[in-house]
């Protein structure tokens, strides 16, 4: 079984965002003391939309799943997932494998959310600042607090774009850029299978069918 991230110590909705934002590796910030207000506003608005979906008690789980799917599309450049999390295998994967992997990975990631939808308890996200690495490449710092979180959790988001067109491409949690960790996990799985991407796809399919563990 492939474990994306520790589920018990992290808000569920953040886990799912992380699953779907594993798109590009982050590097140390280059420009210190420079903030980007549009990038900060993007993260605040899109994260707030995720929170609103989870907090809406008037929608069924099925309706929330559809709304969450769309919110993720607005937040992240999802098609870039396969080009990063597959690492070196992104250069050799067949078009059919790429299609099946992208669909399976997304189904698995959203299943984490759907299977434990009731774990949301009013957590809120607030932007605290940002650092411009270069024009169009910004690290936005936030904290998550409230709900069942005893201490505020610092989360950093790497966003690419500009103006009104931004996308989250990676998330840093507890000092770790999650995209890099996930790529290592997937590449290791494929390596251990003799280079077979189909083994990874099959593993994700099996994991997606397992009921999510309850606390």
Image (cartoon, helix red, strand yellow):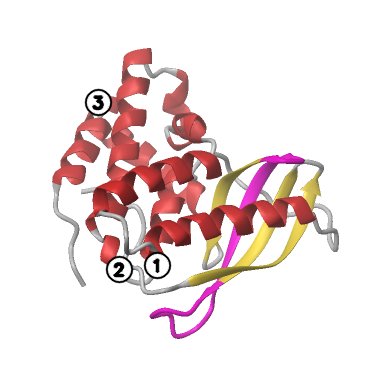
Q: Is the residue under label 3 in contact with that under label 1 (CB below 8 Å)?
A: no
**Crowdedness near tag 2: few (<14), some (14–19) or many (≥20) residues, C-alpha within 10 Å:** some
Q: Residues within 10 Å of mark 3 (few under 14, many from 20)?
A: some
Secondary structure under the numbered disc 1 in the rendered image: loop
Q: How far across and how far down the image is residue 52, in percent?
A: 46, 60
Q: Nearer the viewer, mark 2 or mark 1?
A: 2
Please tell me in which quadrant of the rendered image residue 75 appears: top right
Most extreme residue toward the front is 58
Kindly identify which residue carries mark 2. 119
Q: Are marks 2 and 1 in contact (CB under 8 Å)?
A: yes
Instruction: Between residue 174 and residue 119, name the one nearer to us.
Output: 119
For image coordinates 34% across by 38% down, the residue present is: 106
Q: Residue 198 — which label?
A: 3
* Identity of the residue drawn at 40% across and 67% down: 11
- Residue drawn at (66%, 51%) of the image: 42
**Position of 122 compared to 135: left or right?**
left
Q: Secondary structure at mark 3?
A: helix
Percent of width and height locating residue 188: 35, 40
Residue 95 can be seen in this image: yes
Extent of the magenta region: 144-165
Q: Which residue is disc 1 drawn over?
A: 11
Q: CA distance from mark 3 to mark 2?
A: 32 Å
Give the answer, above or below, for where 209 lies relative to 60: above
Q: Nearer the viewer, residue 124 or 155?
A: 124
């Amino acid at each position: 079984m492939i474990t994306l991230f520790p589920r018990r110590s992290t808000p569920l909705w953040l886990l799912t965002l992380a699953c779907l934002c594993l798109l590009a590796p982050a590097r140390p910030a280059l420009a210190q003391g420079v903030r980007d207000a549009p990038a900060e506003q993007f993260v605040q608005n899109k994260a707030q939309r995720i929170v609103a979906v989870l907090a809406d008690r008037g929608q069924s789980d099925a309706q929330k799943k559809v709304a969450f799917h769309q919110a993720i599309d607005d937040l992240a450049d999802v098609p870039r997932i396969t080009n990063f999390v597959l690492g070196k295998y992104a250069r050799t994967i067949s078009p059919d494998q790429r299609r099946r992997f992208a669909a399976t990975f997304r189904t698995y990631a959203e299943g984490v959310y759907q299977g434990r939808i009731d774990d949301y308890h009013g957590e809120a996200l607030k932007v605290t600042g940002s650092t411009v690495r270069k024009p169009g490449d910004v690290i936005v710092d936030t904290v998550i607090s409230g709900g069942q979180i005893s201490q505020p959790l610092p989360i950093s988001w790497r966003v690419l774009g500009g103006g009104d067109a931004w996308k989250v491409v990676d998330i840093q949690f507890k000092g770790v850029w999650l995209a890099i960790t996930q790529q290592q996990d997937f590449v290791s799985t494929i390596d251990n299978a003799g280079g077979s991407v189909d083994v990874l796809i099959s593993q994700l399919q099996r994991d997606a069918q397992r009921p999510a563990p309850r606390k």
